[in-house]
Amino acid sequence: MMSTITASEPLIAADDLAPPPTLLQLFIGFGTIGLYGFGGVLPWARWMLVEKQRWLAPAEFIDLLSLCQFLPGANIVNLSTCVGVRFHGFRGALVCFIGLMAAPVAIVLLLVMLYDAYGHLPAIESAFKGVSSAAAGLILGMAIKIGWPYRKNLRVMVFAATAIVAVVFFKIPLIWVLAALLPTSMLAAWVSRS
């Protein structure tokens, strides 16, 4: 398991984790994430991996997600690759990626054709506004679930608040915020453990 800052109140102990999934279970799990998470995949990924299947502890999910957000590419694709590699190496990564992407790619192709034909209709425009509001709510809900175990860790809260203020209020590009906060947070974690 990866270890950085551990949650003060873990929701799932390492002993309570399910046995490692098979390749078929990974394919079905990430296929489900891909289908359920249409428009907001990360909340469903956390639900599937941590709460439903118990393949990852909450702190491990946060560690993997943190790594995946820092790497280039789509966070959920990076996460599926990391989870697949963790359990079954290259084959696991490939199975998770295909499971995650197969149905959504087919659905998107169908929706693009429908949108091209009917996207100008007012009802369709209104539907898209509703969908974007729901996706924003899912992301906010996931942020709260991820941050909740760390609510009593002042150092984590300071870095999280700094990142939010820098991006939301000062409109600093995320890459610059990461470039500044990553080494600073690593140094703070190292100093606190010394």
Image (cartoon, rainbow, N blue to C red):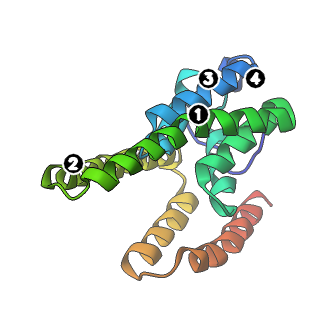
Residue 91 in picture, x, y percent from top left: 83, 33
Query: For this rendering, which residue is in front, 121 or 41?
Result: 121
Above or below — where is 98 with respect to 129?
A: above
Three-letter code for the amino acid on which mark 1 is drawn? Pro
Determine crowd level at label 3: few under 14, some 14-19, many 20+ residues with C-alpha closer than 10 A: some
Marked residue nearer the N-terminal end (4 or 3): 4
Pair 4/2: label in front: 2
Q: In this orientation, does residue 145 appear?
A: no
Residue on which the image places disc 3: 28
Marked residue nearer the N-terminal end (4 or 1): 1
Above or below — where is 57 with respect to 129?
A: above
Residue on which the image places disc 2: 127
Find the distance from the CA under tag 4 to the CA under tag 1.
27 Å
Marked residue nearer the N-terminal end (3 or 2): 3
Residue 138 in picture, x, y percent from top left: 37, 44
Secondary structure of the residue carrying tag 4 is helix
In the picture as drawn, the residue positioned furthest to the front comes out as 117
